[in-house]
Image (tube, helix red, strand yellow):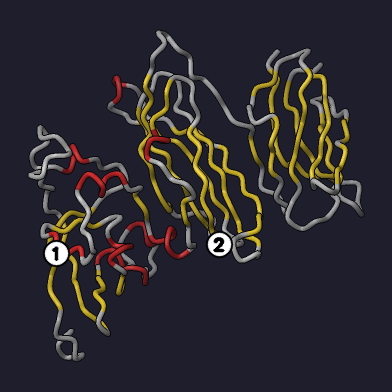
């Protein structure tokens, strides 16, 4: 078919196709070898095409592009047609180094140090900011912090999923804190920047941080996945922690304080919220379980809302946005006081 189209530099590439939870140990034919050894060989489990078009090498993976591929939701995924080598290397590792079409080629250990990504990572132009793989190893009660840019109008969600095999415990999924702000970029235009904060649940030292990106679909597709590892230096350390519960709403607010979910009775908390990117003055308030409102003060220069509240009731506490031309309101975020 390629020759009929006038393309003569084309070949089939054999190698390894990465899955979200793969590691160098599960993918290696010689798992007892150190991952820095030069003779680490991955299991051959896939094939794709390499073609030279207008002087540049591109890749075609018909299986990943097919609507029958489960993650494609019965739609053709065009990303896998004429994919750039620098994009393909996130998920495809060829047996022969020259088939990477990269200069220089990368080692297998570098391949698994990269996050696992899927087509939305590229179509929504996600770009990590100051990414360091060391951030994925949590010491004691540390929190994982990740920051990335994404296209405007793209909404991201993040969850941590643990392993079923770990200490014979059930796999569980917990939500992460995913918040965004519009900040000026290098060219002066506003850019959408997400900050992700994640922890591992108590009793689990391994898991996967999964980030989903969506514009309008009801079920957001997986965009990228990171392995998380915890190292405990203190005996019987309880890492139990939950982030503030965010709710979908028409405006975006950044909850700077408090970012924990659990509040304690008779304690005074400072509620600090960064304003939305629309530059409007919204009416924000903290609503107690009994319905009492504590209005937050607006500071136009900082585009922030601030207020101190003493927690005197148990139950759900909410950050609400009051509607300007009606008596209604909607919930922006939720905390809980357990008494």
Quadrant in which residue 123 is drawn: bottom left
**How many labels sit on residues?**
2
Q: Nearer the viewer, mark 1 or mark 2?
A: 1
Secondary structure beneath label 2: loop
- Who is closer to the viewer here, 197 or 73? 197
Q: Is residue 121 left or right of residue 195?
A: left
Q: Is residue 162 above or below residue 216?
A: above
Ranked by sequence position, the earlier of labels 1 and 2 is 1
Q: Is residue 65 left or right of residue 132?
A: left
- The residue at the point 57 percent across, 43 percent down is 178
**In x, y percent, where is residue 339?**
71, 12
**Residue under circle 2?**
151
- The residue at the point 14 percent across, 87 percent down is 3
Residue placed farthest to the top in the image? 235
**In x, y percent, where is residue 156?**
54, 50
- Who is closer to the viewer here, 273 or 80? 273
**In x, y percent, where is residue 135?**
42, 35
Q: Is residue 196 above or below residue 188?
A: above
Disc 1 crowd rating (10 Å Cα; few below 14, some 14-19, many 20+) is few
- Report the disc number at residue 107: none
Q: Is residue 233 above or below residue 10?
A: above
Q: Is residue 308 left or right of residue 235?
A: right
Quadrant in which residue 9 is drawn: bottom left
CA gap between label 1 and label 2 equals 33 Å
- The residue at the point 60 percent across, 56 percent down is 192
Disc 2 crowd rating (10 Å Cα; few below 14, some 14-19, many 20+) is some
- Who is closer to the viewer here, 104 or 255? 104
- Report the disc number at residue 98: 1
Secondary structure beneath label 1: helix
Quadrant in which residue 179 is drawn: top right
- The residue at the point 25 percent across, 51 percent down is 18
């Amino acid at each position: 078919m390629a020759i009929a189209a006038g393309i003569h530099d084309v070949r089939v590439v054999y190698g390894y196709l990465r899955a979200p939870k793969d590691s160098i140990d599960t993918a290696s034919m010689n798992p007892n070898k150190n991952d820095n050894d030069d003779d680490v060989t991955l299991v051959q489990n896939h094939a794709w095409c390499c073609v030279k078009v207008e002087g540049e090498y591109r890749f075609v993976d018909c299986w990943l592009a097919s609507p029958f591929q489960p993650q494609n939701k019965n739609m053709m995924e065009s990303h896998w047609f004429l994919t750039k080598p620098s994009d393909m290397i996130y998920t495809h590792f060829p047996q022969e180094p020259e088939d990477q079409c990269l200069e220089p080629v990368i080692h297998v250990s570098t391949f698994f140090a990269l996050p696992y990504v899927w087509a939305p990572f590229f179509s929504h132009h996600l770009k990590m900011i100051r990414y360091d793989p060391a951030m994925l190893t949590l010491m004691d009660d540390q929190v994982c912090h990740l920051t990335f840019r994404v296209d405007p109008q793209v909404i991201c969600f993040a969850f941590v999923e643990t392993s079923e095999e770990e200490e014979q415990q059930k796999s569980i999924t917990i939500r992460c804190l995913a918040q965004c702000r519009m900040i000026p970029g290098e060219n002066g235009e506003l850019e959408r920047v997400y900050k992700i904060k994640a922890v591992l649940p108590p009793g689990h030292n391994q898991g996967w941080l999964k980030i989903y990106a969506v514009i309008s679909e009801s079920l957001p597709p997986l965009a990228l996945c990171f392995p998380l590892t915890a190292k405990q230096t203190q005996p019987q350390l309880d890492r139990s922690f939950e982030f503030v519960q965010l709710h979908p709403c028409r405006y975006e607010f950044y909850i700077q304080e408090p970012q924990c979910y659990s509040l304690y009775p008779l304690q005074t908390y400072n509620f600090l919220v960064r304003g939305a990117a629309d530059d409007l003055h919204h009416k924000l308030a903290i609503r107690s379980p009994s319905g009492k409102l504590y209005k937050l003060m607006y500071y136009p220069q900082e585009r922030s809302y601030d207020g101190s509240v003493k927690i005197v009731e148990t139950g759900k506490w909410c950050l609400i946005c009051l509607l300007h031309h009606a008596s209604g309101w909607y919930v922006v975020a939720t905390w809980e006081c357990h008494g």
